[in-house]
């Protein structure tokens, strides 16, 4: 009997960070991943956090082709794990898919890939630990998410409250989202990439059930200009 090394080797954990967006809702000239945040470009926060995590072996960042700013950032301490992939696509899902293909030689089919938005600079070590602890024994994978706390309103076209929707069993998806490499790349290959807003949605479409892991509201996605001040407050409180 031949032994497949991919099945017997212990699965590793690698991070893939899509950072090829333009940040249109931020309304600034430069892409938001390079916006100054607590003394350094926004992208440095999440990348340093993931590179510093002892369970994570490699960190791939997916950049827009022609990105000239990534190499000017401060990557001291990250050298052993960090790789830049200049293959960003039209959408976030396309960037993730291109990045997975580009990193193929460095990742085994059974390895775990933690996909994390560059635009979530306040990711805590506890959240990474919890995700790995609660999903690392599953076949498929899972994601950080927070239960919906606010009352939900369905609006009319004129922005009037038409109806109150139940919030039971509703969660807001965050990142990292963690899937086996083979599961994720196959799900994205089969999905309508233009309609995929997160990795979990592509995996759900295959019939698999990703696990929801309690995240934290502080791990929010910086989207609008006012989000920068909130992220600075959170990072300041966390002592970074
Ligand atoms: N992203 C990417 N490739 C794209 C679009 C987005 O790698 N074609 C990345 C962003 O850089 C970000 C993450 O996906 O780190 C989440 O996307 P989002 O917050 O929507 O960022 P942008 O698309 O840049 O912002 P906007 O939607 O406001 O234009
Ligand atoms: Mg976007």
Image (cartoon, helix red, strand yellow):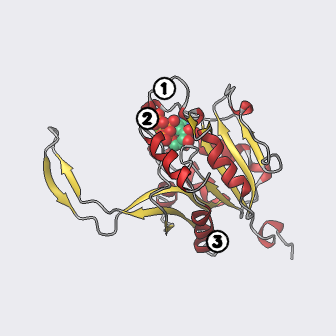
Would you say the beta carbon of the disc 2 residue lies within 8 angstroms of ligand 1? no
Task: Please tell me how crowded label 1 is: few (under 14), some (14-19), or many (20+) other residues with Cα within 10 Å.
Answer: few
Q: Residues within 10 Å of mark 3 (few under 14, many from 20)?
A: some
In this orientation, which residue lies closer to the viewer: 17 or 203? 17
In this rendering, position of residue 222 left or right of residue 61: left
- Quadrant where the N terminus is found in the figure: bottom right
Q: What residue sits 60% from the left and 33% below the top?
A: 34
Q: Image quadrant of residue 224?
A: top left
Residue drawn at 71 percent across, 35 percent down: 73
In this rendered view, identify the residue nearer to me: 76 or 117: 76
Number of callouts? 3
Lower position in the chain sequence, tag 3 or tag 2: 3
Residue 28, horizontal then vertical, whole percent: 48, 26
| Residue bearing mark 1 | 28
Asked whether the residues under the numbered discs 1 and 2 touch, taking CB atoms below 8 Å apart as contact, a structural biologist would say yes
Q: Residue furthest right?
A: 2
Depicted 76 relative to depicted 11: above or below: above
Could you say which disc has been placed on residue 136 in the image? 3
Look at the image and tell me whether residue 109 can be seen: yes
* Residue 161, image x, y percentages: 14, 49
- Residue contact at pointers 3 and 2, CB within 8 angstroms: no
N-terminal label among 3 and 1 = 1
Vertical position of residue 124 compared to residue 120: above or below: below
Helix, strand or loop at label 3? It is: loop
Q: Residues within 10 Å of mark 2 (few under 14, many from 20)?
A: some
Q: Is residue 194 visible?
A: no
Front label number (3 vs 2): 2
Q: Between residues 37 and 170, which one lies in front from this camera angle?
A: 37
Q: Position of residue 70 (x, y in %)?
A: 69, 33
The secondary structure type at the circle numbered 2 is loop
N-term-proximal mark, 1 vs 2: 1
């Amino acid at each position: 009997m031949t032994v497949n090394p991919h099945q017997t080797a212990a699965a590793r954990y690698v991070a893939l960070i899509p950072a090829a967006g333009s940040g249109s809702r931020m309304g600034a000239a430069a892409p938001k991943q390079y916006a100054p945040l607590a003394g350094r470009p926004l992208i440095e926060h999440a990348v340093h956090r993931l590179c510093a995590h002892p369970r994570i072996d490699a960190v791939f960042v997916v950049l827009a082709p022609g990105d000239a700013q990534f190499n000017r950032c401060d990557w001291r301490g990250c050298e052993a794990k960090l790789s830049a992939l200049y293959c960003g696509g039209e959408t976030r899902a396309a960037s993730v898919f291109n990045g997975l293909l580009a990193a193929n030689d460095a990742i085994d089919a059974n390895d775990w890939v933690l996909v994390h938005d560059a635009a979530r600079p306040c990711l805590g070590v506890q959240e990474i630990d919890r995700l790995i602890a609660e999903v690392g024994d599953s076949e498929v994978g899972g994601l950080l998410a927070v239960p919906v706390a606010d009352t939900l309103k369905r609006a009319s076209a004129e922005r009037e409250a038409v109806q109150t929707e139940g919030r039971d069993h509703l969660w807001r998806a965050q990142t990292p989202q963690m899937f086996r490499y083979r599961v994720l790349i196959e799900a994205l290959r089969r999905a309508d990439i233009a309609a995929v807003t997160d990795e979990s949605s592509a995996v759900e479409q295959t019939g698999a059930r990703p696990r929801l892991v309690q995240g934290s509201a502080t791990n929010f996605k910086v989207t609008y200009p006012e989000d920068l001040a909130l992220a600075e407050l959170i990072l300041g409180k966390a002592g970074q």
